[in-house]
Amino acid sequence: MPSINVNGVEIEIDEDGFIVDPDQWNEDVAKYFAQVEGINELTDDHWKVINYLRDYYKQFQIAPMIRKLCKETGCSLKYIYELFPTGPAKGACKLAGLPKPTGCV
Amino acid sequence: MPKYKDMVQPVRATDEEMRHIHIDPVPDDEKCEKALQYLDEMRKKFRSFVLAMESCVKCGACAENCHTYLGTKDPNNIPTNRAELIRKIYKRYFTLEGRWFGKLVGAEDISLDIIEQWYSYFYQCSECRRCARACPFGIDTCEVTFVGRQILHWLGIVPKLHAHVGAAMERVGNHTNLPKPGIVDTLEFLSEEIMDEFGVEVPFPVDQPAEIMYIPSSADFLLNPYTLMGAGMFFTYIGASWTIPSTVTEAGNFGLLFDQMFTQRHNVTRLLDAAQKLGVKKIVWGECGHGWRAAKMYIPTLADRPVRWPITHLHDEIAYYIRTNQLKLDPAKNPKPVTLHDPCNYARACDLIENLRTVIRASVVDFREMTPNREWTFCCGGGSGILFDDPEMYQRRIQLSAKKAELVRATGVGANGDGILCAPCSICKAQLYPMVEEHKLGVEVKGLVDLLGRALVWK
Amino acid sequence: MSYFILQILPYVTMVVFTFGLLYRLGRWAGARIVHDITLSPFPQSNTQVLGIFGAELIFFRSLFSSDRALWVGAWLMHMALFAVIGGHLTGIYFLGKQFIYIGTSENLSEQLSALLGTTMGLIMFAGLLYLFYRRFAVAKVREVSTLSDYLHLVLLLSIVTVGNIMRLWEHDLGITYAPVKDYVTHLVMLMPLPMTHEVFTRPFFVLHLLFVQILLMIFPFSKLMHVFGMFAERWIINRVYKEPAPGLPNVDVQAARRAGLGLPSSEGGV
């Protein structure tokens, strides 16, 4: 298993670069992933999406329906793609420390 | 591991992940011997496989009927050559001519390289069966892919995606790891959305005593809101007593795609348990192609007990209510030009062809057929769950969808950038959402019940 | 040598062919039809299934739709082959006088038999040549071909070439029906022929029979098994399937709409 080092802490990631143990997540990890994904700066809107995903995940152990994510954060899908170029599943979920979505998605 | 000796391969499951789906991977030095043992078992069991091994004349008719070959131009992606990857081993060990004349008839010794070839090419085949339709004898190469994937599974070689799906299904009852609270929250959210957009009250009963058990695709909970909404609106509209079982929120059955023994049967057992527990009278299936094939065609032979529940597809039911004039529909609510992608499993394995048209013609104003269509449909390129998204395999998906893109373009529905590509299957949707962008088709991908729900006239 | 090919080898051929065939078909029968893999649209009755079998057998329907260029050659070749086999059986049995049963004179019947045989033989030759050409010329066909695919065609072409030579130069190189009928009768009755019999003096006849026997001996161990494979495969993928009845339990749409289900203002809304 590959791993990354964020501020001296070894964090395991899978082949797709997703964090293996969501409990190891912190804001620095999100900043690290932002660099990997080519996002220069995490704005308030980025954090709004990330925090919503984390809260939802904490409550339901799953990412929300994309439509719900858009509605609750007030960001259109297009805008989410602007914020996270690889999209809500591969981009936003990775930054938020959620596991990679599986199935026919 | 995206490449092995110049062959693309999907990222594979780790040994630990294999153990989650009840397989102890076979060490490399035993793989060849075990592969032969499993191949021997399969050939003694499946006549469809034996016939594919023994009666192909290599006429080449399958080549240009396969979207995988058309998209990649890789000779090993010609259906008969893909089958040849196993056939040459089969000949060498299980036929007289192969043992005696070897090279002359194309027999070959097994090796790890051959097994790696199987992994690469059997996961580029989408098991769409167009080659079976095209073959003058009806040889079904899909059966060869099934056998190849089964052997690979027993050896411990399965794509990470398929292994994750298998483990998630066993853990929570769907492919996306969606637990019951998430299911209920999403359905409540959709009820609100329906009220906002259509002004009607549509509840989504979960685990309620009911007459009908509806099996949605779990991808609908994350990606396809209108598919779930449409189904809920239909059931409410006709006043059905229906429920979604939280233990099986999955129309798909990836067992069909990588393990037709334990995994597929286990999922069937789970479904029948749910039906029994809820005391339903009928099971209605959601929009999922391979899952509908697994349900309609395989449950009778995989259920190890009497199946008391008729199982029908949502669109068989909707078409019935349309034909009997019981639904009031206003096609004008779907004014954009629409074309229909026939999912391969509906069209060639389940005979769900005309009913799709009954529904779509009643629901939209401007419906344009694709050519070829019906049982000659070309696959979306994602069939059998080859929705891999590492860079190499993603590129391959673009190639595999090239033929479909060409056909969609030819219908002209996307000419003004506002067309709809109706694809009533979760794998097709997951494949086509990004592919219509990659190929710049000017269409939006929708399910079929999405359009029906929008067209319902409530007053 | 001629004596061996015409008097001893045929029995070896028949044993190899028969037991080889039984061995192969037995292997097929040993494996089972495990799941329902019928191809849709599903036939609704056995009559429709027969229709599918017939259309595939007589017209090569699937191939017609999937690969027209191949269909032309394959269909012509096979139809000529069926005609030639039928011609051999009837021509030799009736000594070329089979057409008197449809009202021709004996003379005309013999001429017709010769004309049809020659024509079909040439069509088959052309068809085989075309299939051979495709194996070299068409990239996708070249890519699926192995050595044995070419050798099959070489063998078939040899048989047909010799047969056509015997037809076209009948008086010099061919043979008439009568001695052949005599030969076959003796063969079937297990009675040896005298060494002086005419069949032994016709080298092209002997060669023709040698090639045919080679073909029959490799038949059970080769792709020629597609003759039986087609029926066995279609027996699996073209079966009757009856749909379960549509209609949902205890659903009354009219009552539901009267009650206004789903409408927020309604009393009956859920």
Image (cartoon, rainbow, N blue to C red):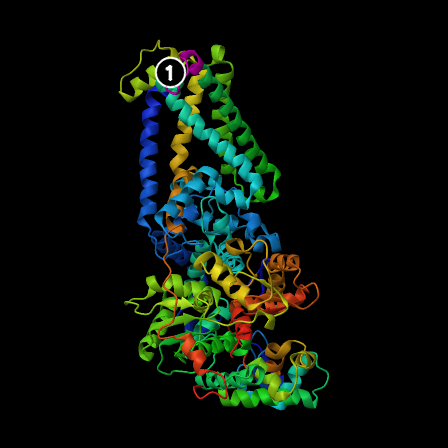
* Residue appearing at x 32%, y 34% in the figure: C18
Chain identifier of the residue bearing label 1 in the image: C
Q: Is residue A9 left or right of residue C110?
A: right
* SS at badge 1: loop
**Quarter that holds the N terminus of chain B:** bottom right
Q: Is residue B406 shown above or below B171?
A: above
Mark 1 is surrounded, within 10 Å at the Cα level, by few (under 14), some (14 to 19) or many (20 or more) other residues, namely some
Q: Is residue B100 magenta?
A: no
Q: Is residue B228 shown above or below B336?
A: below
Q: Which residue is mark 1?
A: C95
Q: Is residue B366 left or right of residue B33?
A: right
Q: Nearer the viewer, residue B277 or C247?
A: C247
Residue B94 shows up from this direction? no
Main secondary structure of the magenta stretch: helix
Q: Is residue B240 shown above or below C147?
A: below
Furthest-top residue in this view = C196
Q: The magenta stretch spans which residues?
A: C100-110
Q: Is residue B228 shown above or below B342?
A: below
Q: Quadrant of residue A95?
A: bottom right
* Residue appearing at x 51%, y 18% in the figure: C165
- In the rendered image, residue B28, in percent from the top left (x then y), is placed at 46, 62
- In the rendered image, residue C137, in percent from the top left (x then y), is placed at 62, 38
- In the rendered image, residue B279, in percent from the top left (x then y), is placed at 31, 78
* Residue appearing at x 51%, y 75% in the figure: B230
Furthest-right residue in this view = A40
Q: Nearer the viewer, residue B80 or C130?
A: C130
Q: Quadrant of residue B306?
A: bottom left
Q: Quadrant of residue B388?
A: bottom right
What amino acid type should be assigned to the residue bearing mark 1? Leu
Q: Is residue C106 magenta?
A: yes
